[in-house]
Image: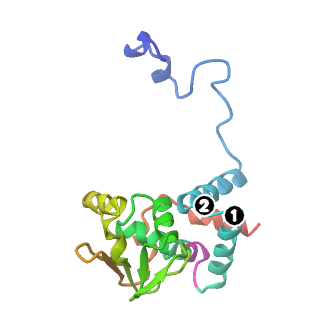
């Protein structure tokens, strides 16, 4: 690895802002297009979406009133798999997507197995009675103590259900996303 020298002040890795060696000082600045593409790819991976699905979501957001970037983030936050993750029933969005896909959740008392389903204010998301003993869900709910549920959602851990109080607003989304770059990319 780094060797003994890196435990002193003479460590090259600590003194320079780039890795040692012939190829250490590579090109670090991206073009505008590169930054826009990276931002889009980052958001796609965060929410676990494929390109066509993401493009359709953006097209829907651009048709809505208001800012396209904020509308996109609000649509992404309203997805059932994301709401399940935000409520704390899963430790990651991918896990939430799988739980939804396997039919563990009810939306307003009806079985829902589509992760991309858009949730509306007043809707109730609950864990099926058979699924309340699933180890992954109970473990995720126990670790919820460290995470906070967003203000636009409300959870009742004892009954394994959550309610959407209102639509999320941009201030509720604390993820490091620069949605304007995505808008610029799609408006080329």
> Could you tell me residue 4's position as x and y percent?
41, 10
Q: Is residue 65 left or right of residue 83?
A: right
Rendered-image quadrant of the C terminus = bottom right
Q: Quadrant of residue 151?
A: bottom left
Which of 39/78 is in front? 78
**Magenta stretch, residue numbers:** 66-72
> Could you tell me residue 20's position as x and y percent?
58, 19
Q: For the view shown, which residue lies furthest in the right direction?
A: 188
Q: Is residue 50 left or right of residue 130?
A: right
The residue singled out by tag 1 in the image is 51
Which of 99/35 is in front? 99
Using a 10 Å C-alpha cutoff, classify the residue at mark 2 as few (fewer than 14 neighbours), some (14 to 19) or many (20 or more): some
> Could you tell me residue 128's position as x and y percent?
37, 77
**What residue sits 45% from the left and 23% below the top?**
14
Asked if residue 125 is positioned above or below residue 20 in the image, the reply reads: below
Q: Secondary structure at mark 2?
A: helix
Q: For the view shown, which residue lies furthest in the front direction?
A: 130
| Residue 82, label in figure | none
Q: Secondary structure at mark 1?
A: helix
Q: Disc 1, disc 2: CB below 8 Å?
A: yes
Q: Quadrant of residue 126?
A: bottom left
Which of 122/111 is in front? 111
Magenta segment, principal secondary structure? helix
The residue singled out by tag 2 in the image is 44
Q: Is residue 158 left or right of residue 43?
A: left
């Amino acid at each position: 690895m780094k060797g003994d020298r890196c435990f002193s002040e003479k460590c090259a890795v600590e003194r320079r802002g780039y890795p040692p060696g012939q190829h250490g000082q590579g090109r670090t600045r991206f073009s505008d297009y590169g930054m826009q593409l990276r931002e889009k790819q980052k958001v796609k991976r965060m929410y676990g979406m494929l390109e066509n699905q993401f493009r359709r979501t953006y097209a829907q957001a651009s048709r809505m009133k208001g800012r396209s970037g904020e509308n996109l983030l609000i649509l992404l936050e309203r997805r059932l798999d994301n709401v399940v993750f935000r409520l704390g029933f899963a430790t990651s969005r991918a896990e939430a997507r799988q739980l939804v896909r396997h039919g563990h959740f009810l939306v307003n008392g009806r079985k829902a197995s589509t992760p991309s389903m858009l949730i509306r204010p007043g809707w109730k998301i609950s864990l099926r009675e058979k699924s309340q003993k699933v180890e992954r869900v109970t473990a995720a709910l126990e670790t919820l103590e460290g995470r906070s549920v967003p203000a636009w959602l409300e959870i009742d851990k004892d009954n394994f259900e959550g309610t959407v109080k209102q639509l999320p607003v941009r201030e509720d989304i604390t993820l490091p996303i620069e949605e304007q770059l995505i808008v610029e990319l799609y408006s080329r």
